[in-house]
Amino acid sequence: MVIIDGADRCADASLVSILVAPTSTRYDLTSKYQVEVPRGTGSLERSVVLVDLVQPIPRSAFRTKMGSFSPEKLEELHAMILSNLGVLPDE
């Protein structure tokens, strides 16, 4: 699971949920609307971030930060989220 909420929302203890996108190692199910993540990124195995399945998860479900993405991978992930929402034009 990848937290996709911004830093301000993550730091706001009054919010009961955090927005996340699930991950999968099933590359055979990858579509152009998801983001591939190489092994070792954010402590993940080679994975796909299922950006089209964004969902809220209770804040209490999170205990430990497992890792983080590079600024370039975060930019790619944010761009895919905006594209999926129709905020950015398709490429």
Image (cartoon, rainbow, N blue to C red):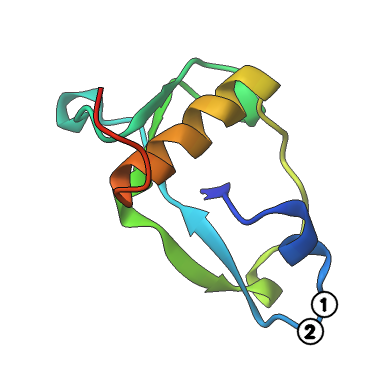
On residue 14, the disc is: 2
Question: Which SS class for mark 2?
Answer: loop
**x and y percent of residue 53 in the render?**
32, 55
Up/down of 47 relative to 80, above or below: above
* Place of residue 51 in the rendered image (x, y in percent of width and height, measured from the top left): 37, 44
Under mark 2, the amino acid is Ser
Q: Residues within 10 Å of mark 1 (few under 14, many from 20)?
A: few
Residue 13 image label: 1
Q: CA distance from mark 1 to mark 2?
A: 4 Å
Q: Quadrant of the C terminus?
A: top left
Residue 61 versus residue 40 in the image, above or below: below
Q: Residue at x 72, y 34 (%)?
A: 67
Q: Residue at x 78, y 60 (%)?
A: 8
> What residue is at 22 percent from the left and 29 percent from the top?
30
Q: Residue 54 falls in which quadrant of the image? A: bottom left
Q: Position of residue 5 (x, y in %)?
A: 62, 56
At a point 52% along the width and 16% down the height, the residue shown is 39
